[in-house]
Image: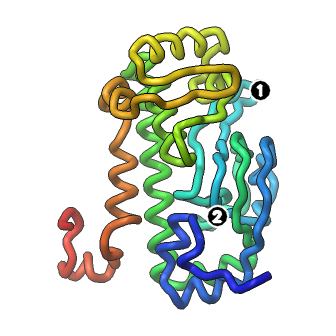
Amino acid sequence: MKELLQRQVKNRLLRRFPRDAFELLAPLLQPVDLPVNHPLVLPRKPIEHVCFLESGLASMVAESADGKSVEIRHIGREGIAGYPVVLGVDQTPNKTFMQVPGYGLQVATEDLLPILDHPEVRQLLLRYVHTCELQLAHSALAAAKFNMHQRLARWLLMCHDRIDGNDLPLTHEFLALMLGVRRAGVTDELHILEGMHAIKSTRGNVRITDRNKLIEIAGGCYGVPEQEYERLIEGPEPVHLADFLNGHHPIGTR
């Protein structure tokens, strides 16, 4: 395998790694193809690898004891599959698998853990976990306070954020999993968004025709977690915790 250069990676977390930490990690990263349904994290099984997605879309799914399931978040090139290891967790009841094919850079958990001792890496990944928790919180907010087509608009925007182009290869079954509704209900909601001229839905594909209209439809249930990711992960300069505690770089100033 030829040398992996940081400027060549597409994963947004890897691009923000401190140079010295990336140089330690790069030889340990293995490129992997990620076909549809490829498992990344199995429920109640040791998380043996962490995958930095370069393309494609992964779903994290929660399942009840009686077999009911719903997607709780998805992961693209902004993140990593297997992030519970950042919190010192060796396994999780949730499962993560690919919904849209792509590829990634995979590292054994045992090889990643020593690199987490790097203070800037740990801070970066903990901030990423914070944005994941915020995404979950806003999913709960959307489910409780927004109607179905607003929630669908939010999920489509989140997929659009993580996939190249305007065509989202999403089945109605997947959209039903995202929203926790029956497939027929998804079809009705897609028709509503089509009638608003925000999307064009065909079998196995949703084309975003007017992203701004989709944002308008989603209203307040989309945007806050995304803004927090941009602030903490993609800011012009990383905000170091020690600087913040010492008052040298107050959070909220850009």
Q: Which residue is mark 2?
A: 52
Q: Secondary structure at mark 1?
A: loop
Depth check: give the residue in front, 215 or 94. Answer: 215
Q: Tell me what residue is drawn at x 40 percent, y 29 percent.
A: 210
Image quarter of residue 25 = bottom right
Depth check: give the residue in front, 225 or 92. Answer: 225
Q: Residues within 10 Å of mark 1 (few under 14, many from 20)?
A: few
Indicate the amino acid at tag 2.
Phe
Image quarter of residue 107 = bottom right
Depth check: give the residue in front, 63 or 174. Answer: 174
Q: CA distance from mark 1 to mark 2?
A: 29 Å
Instruction: Report whether 152 appears left or right of 220.
Output: right
Q: Which residue is mark 1?
A: 67
Q: Secondary structure at mark 2?
A: strand
From the top left corner, tell me how far across and down residue 63 is, in percent. 70, 33
Instruction: Report whether 230 appears left or right of 45.
Output: left
Quadrant in the picture for the N terminus: bottom right
